[in-house]
Structure formats: C-alpha cells, structure tokens
Image (cartoon, grey):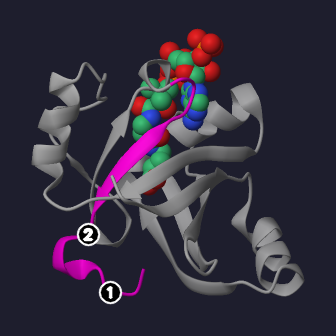
C-alpha cells in the first residue's frame, strides 16, 4: 500500500456540509454520485494530495446511517489506492487481516473496493480502492 486515495467522512446532509468544504475551506468539488449498493450519496473533493469523500446515508439501514447513529458525523474510513485488488486481498488474508468481503464490491466512480474490519486494523476502517484504468476519470 503506497498511497492514500481518499478519506471518507460521514455527514448527515451533503447540502449542509458541502458549502463548508467548498466556500469556507476552498476545496474543489469533483463530482457527486449515488452508490446504491452501499446506500450512500457521495461527494468527492480535491484536497491536493488526497481526496475527501463525503458520505451521506441513503435510508436508515446502511453502514453510514448506522455509523452516524452510533458515533455521529466524522471520519469514517481511509482508502488506499491499489492495483490488482484481488491479489492485495489475498495477501492481506494470508497475513490474517479480516476482510469484510471475499470479492470486491463496485464503489464510487466504478472502482472495485473492499474493506478491512476495524477490529483487525487497530480501530480504523481501511478500504482498498482499485480504479484500474479509470484513474483519470471524473473522480
Ligand atoms: N471506523 C472504526 N470503527 C468502526 C467503524 C468505523 N468506520 N464502524 C464501526 N466500527 C466499530 C464499531 O463501533 C464496533 O466497535 P465496538 O464493538 O467497540 O462497539 C465495531 O466496529 C464493530 O461494529 P459492529 O456494530 O459489529 O458492526 P457494524 O454493523 O457497525 O459494521 C462495519 C461495521 C465496518 C463492519 C460495516 O460498517 C461495514 O461493513 N463497512 C464496510 C462498508 C462501508 O463502510 N460502506 C460505506 C462506505 C461506502 C463507500 O465508501 O462508497
């Protein structure tokens, strides 16, 4: 793992949070999309060497809705940019990391993503994010 692609931040309402990031902090909005299988609406912001992913829950039973209910708004995960995600997952599994899925899911921007359980990563939810040749896409 050589670079952090983005930091995921759970927010209750994108329309309330975005003006803070864009107008107050001066970050550039890269795009907004819904990721239905994760039950979130996300906004990516350019923060220079890393992106910020604001995550608003869709409905009440997704991971982000549950996180906000339990822990409030705030930093939710850190995503490493990787290539060949299946090999990375296999390597991590062999090292005893508890991955939350056997196969990658489809994430924002068409990336393949997989998560490591925070209990096996010292309290941090880490994501592997493989954009393949989509690295230069809108996100
Ligand atoms: N960071 C750190 N710890 C977290 C956490 C997070 N984001 N989310 C949950 N935890 C902690 C919980 O507080 C709990 O700790 P305690 O046992 O000390 O209370 C522990 O992890 C296990 O929690 P749980 O209640 O058993 O499990 P949850 O139902 O809360 O699920 C998790 C947690 C990580 C397994 C689940 O959120 C998940 O599968 N996440 C992966 C998918 C995801 O996060 N999708 C949203 C992002 C999508 C995107 O980026 O596009």
Q: Earlier in the sequence, mark 2 or mark 1?
A: 2
State which quadrant residue 100 falls in: top left
Label pair 2/1, CB-CB below 8 angstroms:
yes
Q: Is residue 36 shown above or below 138? A: above
Q: Is residue 110 shown above or below 102? A: below
For mark 1, give the secondary structure. Answer: loop
State which quadrant residue 133 falls in: bottom left
Where does the magenta region start and end? 122-139
Q: Residue at x 74, y 59 (%)?
A: 13
Does the magenta segment cover residue 21?
no
Q: Position of residue 119 (x, y in %)?
A: 48, 18
- Regarding residue 89, the answer to whether it shows in the image is yes
- Regarding residue 39, the answer to whether it shows in the image is no
Task: Single out the residue that lies furthest toward the front.
Answer: 2
Q: Residue at x 36, y 39 (%)?
A: 115
Question: Badge 1 is on which residue?
Answer: 137
For mark 2, give the secondary structure. Answer: loop
Using the image as rendered, state which of residue 28 and residue 50 is in the foreground: 50
Using the image as rendered, state which of residue 128 and residue 3 is in the foreground: 3
Q: Residue at x 61, y 77 (%)?
A: 45
| Label 2: how many Cα within 10 Å (few below 14, some 14–19, many 20+) | many
Q: Position of residue 70 (x, y in %)?
A: 71, 25
Q: Position of residue 126 (x, y in %)?
A: 45, 41
| Label 1: how many Cα within 10 Å (few below 14, some 14–19, many 20+) | few
Residue 131: mark: 2
């Amino acid at each position: 793992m050589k670079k952090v692609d983005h930091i995921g931040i759970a927010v209750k309402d994108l329309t309330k949070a975005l003006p803070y990031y864009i107008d107050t902090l001066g970050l550039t909005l890269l795009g907004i999309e819904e990721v239905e299988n994760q039950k979130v609406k996300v906004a990516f912001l350019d923060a220079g060497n890393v992106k910020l992913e604001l995550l608003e829950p869709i409905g009440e039973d997704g991971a982000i809705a549950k996180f906000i209910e339990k822990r409030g708004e705030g930093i939710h995960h850190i995503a490493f940019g990787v290539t060949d995600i299946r090999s990375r997952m296999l390597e991590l599994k062999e090292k005893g990391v508890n991955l939350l899925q056997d196969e990658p899911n489809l994430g924002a921007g068409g990336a393949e993503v997989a998560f490591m359980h925070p209990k096996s990563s010292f309290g941090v939810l880490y994501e592997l994010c493989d954009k393949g040749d989509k690295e230069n896409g809108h996100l």
